[in-house]
Amino acid sequence: MEEYVEYISRSPEDTARISAEIATQLRAGDIILYEGDMGAGKTTFTKGLAAALGITDPVTSPTFALVNEYTEGRLPLFHFDLYRIDSYDDLYAIGFLDYLDRGGVIAAEWSENIEGLEQELAGDSSRTIMKIRIEKTGENERRIKVRGHIVCPLCGSNEISKATVKQTGDTVRICEGCGALWTEPRISSDNSTTFAHYMESRGLKPYWNELEGKQYL
């Protein structure tokens, strides 16, 4: 099972805060692939990204334009709607791949319409491909799952690494900033413990040299 960060948003303001956390880590060439039903909040999430990137133009859904360009921020943002795109021929026709070389961030709604899109784009290791799944869990509440861009949901600013505990063989996921620790792929604020507590409860010293095979998620 793949690791992912899970956030709960209870308002558009929450969604903007979550997307702002993610925006701080974005680099030129990164790609965001959204999944989620109509009205889940994909455009709301993009508005938060744009604001955090320093974009002041109003962000609107690109449903009819297919792509909206916002170029005055820290990074250009290219916001695609792929709802009516269901083949690679159509993707080429709208110039989607040309935007990969324009030094900005692509945020594409309805990415699930094109089978294998993530794998197709994954050939270039210089860019991060982030999958964001937004699920409606109430009138205003949303569950936001982020894969491919793992930032601690507790401190919101540090990357998470995965390692094996030598003496137990357990796989753990640890925020090197605040010391939060998870023992399962779902990384959320409600299922964390701390590095020190985990190690001490097993009679181990809470030192990094008790771990092996550490890698960033």
Image (spheres, grey):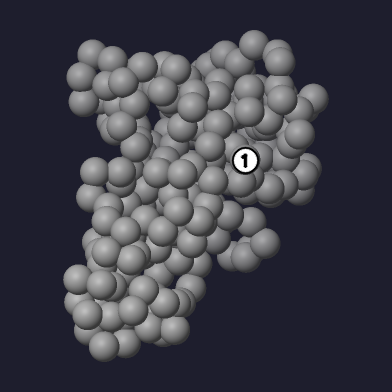
* Residue at the spot of label 1: 24
- Visible in this render: residue 1? no
- Residue 192 higher or lower than 199, as above or below: above
| Quadrant placement of the N terminus | bottom left
158 or 111, nearer to the observer: 158
* Residue appearing at x 61%, y 16% in the figure: 59
196 or 166, nearer to the observer: 196
Mark 1 neighbour density, 10 Å: few (under 14) some (14–19) many (20 or more): few
Q: Position of residue 51 (x, y in %)?
A: 63, 22
- Visible in this render: residue 11? yes
- Residue 127 higher or lower than 60, as above or below: below
Q: Position of residue 60 (x, y in %)?
A: 57, 14
Could you tell whether 208 is left or right of 103 in the image?
left
* Residue appearing at x 40%, y 44% in the figure: 154
* Residue appearing at x 20%, y 71% in the figure: 201
Q: Position of residue 20 (x, y in %)?
A: 55, 31
Q: Position of residue 188 (x, y in %)?
A: 30, 46
- Residue 163 higher or lower than 125, as above or below: below
Q: In which image quadrant can residue 122 be found? A: bottom right
* Residue appearing at x 53%, y 40% in the figure: 22
Three-letter amino acid code at the position of disc 1: Thr
Callout 1: SS: loop
